[in-house]
Image (tube, grey):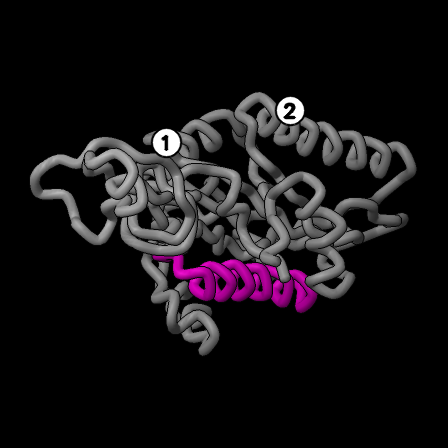
């Protein structure tokens, strides 16, 4: 019932079912023009010829296949709990399956720091990619995903799946996703316990990327600073997304996938209804 917002843009590329930038052979009449030698005689307007004695051509809306580049952040924080692992996997499966079902040409890239690999879209459901990504060896496991290294295609709808839990300026990410007439969209899975923790007392915190343990005592002031920092971090991402006219859908991990997408992705046009 939901898919990426393919109808929101004009496409260029191979034959398919979505509006292109030129004329083609669909059943949707667009315009007419004078006949020129070499034109397809199947598109001659014979009714107009009977009236005027002049050959003219029917022009139809070009229908083409969308192009989708999916970029999956596979840093360990994306799989830190069973709930987040499941939501990350569901988002990848949904975006891949729905795009293929609409005839899109899909490429998938897994990125961890400066390491990257391709994932076969047809093999996503088998889940083998989860084993394959373990072979990625970034020079710094805690570094942000370097998506600017990816061979993103011109004119593609570029979808980043990432929890965005890394310190960086968001603007270069949106510029990379939008360059060469790209259409960027961001899906950010998150845990309620990550966004609104109720910690108090002594804890051993685990660095998801480096696997190191850090003991801390959490007082009320400490928890307040965490909440402020977390909010400020995502406020920067939201402001940058608005500046670059990019839908940024933060998807909670706790509810079922489809209700979460209807509530958080559809209203901001990160997705559209397929019917």
Total numbered labels placed on residues in the image: 2
Q: Residue 261: where, in percent of width, then height?
A: 69, 54
Disc 1 residue crowd, few under 14, some 14–19, many 20+, Cα 10 Å:
few
* Residue appearing at x 76%, y 50% in the figure: 263
- Kindly tell me whether residue 134 is visible in this rendering: yes
User: Tag 1, which secondary structure?
Assistant: loop
Which residue is the site of mark 2? 239
Q: Earlier in the sequence, mark 1 or mark 2?
A: 1
Nearest to viewer (mark 1 / mark 2): 1
Kindly identify the residue that appears in the image at 25 percent across and 48 percent down: 43
Helix, strand or loop at mark 2: helix
Closer to the camera in the image, 107 or 144: 107
* Magenta span main SS: helix
Residue placed at 52% from the left, 39% from the top?
8
Q: Position of residue 183 (x, y in %)?
A: 45, 37
Horizontal relation, residue 186 to residue 131: left or right: right
For disc 1, the marked residue is: 181
Which residue lies most toward the left here? 37
The answer to whether residue 98 is magenta is yes
Q: Is residue 152 visible?
A: no
- Specify the segment rendered in magenta: 80-106
| Residue 37 on image: x %, y % | 8, 38
Q: Quadrant of the C terminus?
A: bottom right
């Amino acid at each position: 019932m939901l898919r990426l917002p393919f109808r929101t843009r004009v496409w260029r590329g191979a034959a398919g079912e979505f509006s292109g930038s030129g004329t083609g052979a669909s059943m949707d009449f667009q315009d007419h023009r004078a006949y020129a030698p070499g034109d397809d005689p199947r598109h001659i307007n014979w009714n107009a010829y009977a009236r005027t004695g002049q050959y003219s051509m029917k022009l139809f809306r070009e229908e083409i296949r969308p192009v989708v580049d999916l970029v999956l952040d596979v840093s360990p924080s994306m799989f830190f709990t069973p709930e987040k692992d499941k939501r990350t996997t569901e988002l990848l499966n949904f975006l891949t399956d729905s795009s293929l079902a609409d005839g899109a040409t899909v490429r998938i890239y897994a990125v961890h720091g400066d390491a990257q690999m391709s994932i076969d879209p047809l093999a996503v459901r088998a889940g083998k990619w989860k084993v394959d990504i373990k072979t990625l060896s970034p020079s710094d496991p805690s570094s942000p995903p370097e998506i600017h290294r990816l061979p993103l295609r011109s004119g593609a709808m570029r979808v980043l799946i990432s929890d965005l839990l890394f310190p960086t300026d968001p603007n270069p990410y949106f510029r990379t996703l939008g360059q060469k007439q790209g259409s960027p969209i961001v899906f950010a899975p998150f845990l309620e316990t990550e966004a609104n923790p109720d910690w108090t007392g002594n804890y051993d915190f685990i660095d998801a990327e480096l696997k190191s343990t850090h003991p801390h005592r959490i007082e009320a002031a400490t928890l307040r600073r965490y909440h402020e920092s977390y909010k400020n971090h995502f406020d920067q991402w939201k402001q940058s997304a608005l500046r670059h006219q990019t839908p940024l859908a933060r998807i909670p991990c706790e509810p079922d996938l489809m209700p979460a997408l209807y509530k958080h992705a559809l209203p901001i046009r990160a997705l559209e209804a397929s019917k």
